[in-house]
Amino acid sequence: MLANKVFLEILMIGCGILGLIGVIMGVREWWVLRKIAALPLDAFPIKKTTFCQLVVDWCHEHISHKNTRKPNVILSYYPHKKRSGVYTSRSHECVIYVNNHQNVLNVTNTVIHEYVHARQKNKDFDSLYTRYQREIGYENNPFEIEARKVANKYEKECLLWICQQMK
């Protein structure tokens, strides 16, 4: 009976310690994201090209389908009037208009968004994408809906991963 009581007390203490560690890690992640996510890309301690390539590397590891090839990433320093980024299926390139972004989190979101388009590419991608744009518009285009959903879901996780790679 005493052995069971001691075992349960040790188990409770162990669970408490694990819970405390979880809370500390959660607070640390929140603090890191709060501090880093709002930084302009110019203030981030790595080159813009390296940063964007790390986002693509993360995407390829975590959200790729087995047949997805990594797209080439091209940074454009000229602001675009309407777009933050664009995927071109013919050349399999993601162009990121880096000066159209407010902060590091926005750039991360855009690179993930364009990577999703690279993942969506198949033989009918261009014709379907164009048809959807014409018939239902950009906001309701299923390709765009998926890309926005995935980018919003993973932007913070990806940014945390990049911060860990820099240590």
Image (spheres, rainbow, N blue to C red):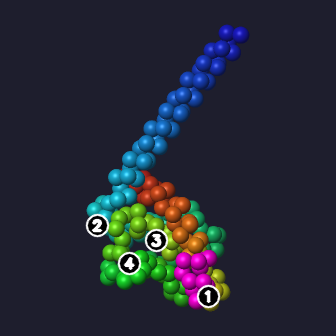
Separation (CA) of disc 1 from disc 4:
27 Å
Question: Which residue range is magenta in the image?
Answer: 132-143
- What amino acid type should be assigned to the residue bearing mark 3? Val
- What amino acid type should be assigned to the residue bearing mark 4? Tyr
Tell which circle, 3 or 1, labels the residue nearer the N-terminal end: 3
Residue that numbered label 2 is attached to: 42
* Residue 97 - label: 4
- What amino acid type should be assigned to the residue bearing mark 2? Asp
Please indicate whether residue 7 sits to the left or right of residue 36 in the image.
Answer: right
Separation (CA) of disc 4 from disc 3:
10 Å
Residue that numbered label 3 is attached to: 111
Residue 157 position, x and y percent, is: 49, 56
> Can see residue 73?
yes
Write the residue at 37% across / 83% down. 81
Which image quarter holds the N terminus? Answer: top right
* Discs 2, 4 touching: Cβ within 8 Å: no
Separation (CA) of disc 3 from disc 2:
16 Å
Separation (CA) of disc 2 from disc 4:
14 Å
Asked if the stretch drawn in magenta spans residue 82, the answer is no
Tell which circle, 4 or 3, labels the residue nearer the N-terminal end: 4
Q: Residue furthest left?
A: 43
Report the front residue among 159 and 82: 82
Please indicate whether residue 147 sits to the left or right of residue 45 in the image.
Answer: right
Residue 37 position, x and y percent, is: 38, 58
